[in-house]
Amino acid sequence: MSAIDFMAEALAIKDEIIALRRKIHQYPEIGGTETETQRLVVDYLEALGVKTQKIADTGVLGLLEGSKPGGAVGLRADMDALKIQEQTGVPYASVRPGIMHACGHDCHTATLLGAARILAAHRENLPGNVKFFFQPDEEGDGGAERMIAAGGLENPKVTAMFGAHVNPGLPVGSIGVRPGKSYAASNPFEITIKGFGSHGAAPHLGVDAIAVACQVVSALQLCISRETDPVDSAIITVGTIQGGTQRNSIAEEVKMSGIIRTLGPATRQKIVAAARRVAEGTAHALGAQAEIVIHESYPGVVNDPAMTELARESIAELLGEDKVVPISVPNMGTEDFGIFLEHVPGSFYQAGVANPAKTPTVSLHSGQFNVDEDALPVMSAVHAKVAWDYLKGVSR
């Protein structure tokens, strides 16, 4: 057979991909409630002859079976929106007050549907199987783990995973790639400082939980500046703090919450242990008590070097070397795609959507966030080609 022109085929369905994205954008659903999006995805895939399974409550797993024997590759898109009020003013803006696709998951879902259409059109020559993971609740508790627990990687067994996230820092039409540590692991935490209340005129009779909490916040930053390798990265953020009942009383209790972000499992283990030690030790030294609860959350995204190189070569062949952007530094944001990569090798690339002439240059999670929709067929073509090239290599 002649080589498939994935880009030409994606451009031929550009209007359809855009229409899908706008419909999803207009009717956003937060994590765990993506029933309308789930229905749209199921209907679209089944019309293509892709087998579908509802999974992880509001997720969808699609299976495209190629006519030729081979392995199985996974492609993932997340579907959930955020509790953010949209401020874009576009005709297809969210009709749901306080809920918006401000992180590009509408683009992820629409472009993976586009990739499914392209690949389904060539199933007679497809050397293996493609599994499409339409994942719920990435912004919340994480749907990736639930999809895996429900058997999403099995029958047939997925041996590589690929996915993408829109990046408003990259120009439209470009794709960013990075092997190794790419997104941070996260560990949310709560700290309760317990002191002893007294009258504000007699502070020596109490233990000021607010004063202790201030010292704990400052001491936690020493875990970053003095316990993290200078060429590594870690962040401890205390995002909330509440304490005290009256302005003329010594506070008995303070509650704080925040998040630890680290790159790689070794740094994660070290900084989590250090944060616990420092919070408890600082409070104890000042006569108070610190109770700290640190949760296990997303593990970080560590891209497999070989799979990243495969993706890079596929993208360069599709778009040209000049459209492949090496990502020099990791993203300290979190992304539960890393849970897939704990089970199978793969790579998570970044799709450029920036075009100041069309959309404002704002960050993800902004009420003004929007994308240049010229990026959408590029994403569909990249997904389709990367999956095809992986299966072609496995079948050799």
Image (cartoon, rainbow, N blue to C red):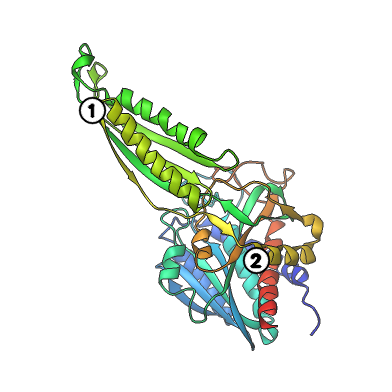
Q: Is residue 259 above or below residue 288?
A: below
Image side of residue 271 versus residue 73, left or right: left
Q: Earlier in the sequence, mark 2 or mark 1?
A: 1
Q: Amino acid at mark 2?
A: Met
Residue 307's mark?
2
- The quadrant in which the N terminus is found is bottom right
Q: Amino acid at mark 1?
A: Gly
Q: What residue lies at 20% left-to-right and 13% top-to-bottom?
A: 202
Residue 47's mark?
none
From the top left corner, tell me how far across and down residue 222 is, in percent. Answer: 46, 32
Q: What residue lies at 80% left-to-right and 59% top-to-bottom?
A: 321
In front of the other: 227 or 169: 227
Q: What residue lies at 64% left-to-right and 75% top-to-bottom?
A: 117
From the top left corner, tell me how far across and down residue 7 is, in percent. Answer: 76, 68
Which residue is tagged 1? 195
Q: CA distance from mark 2 to mark 1?
A: 52 Å
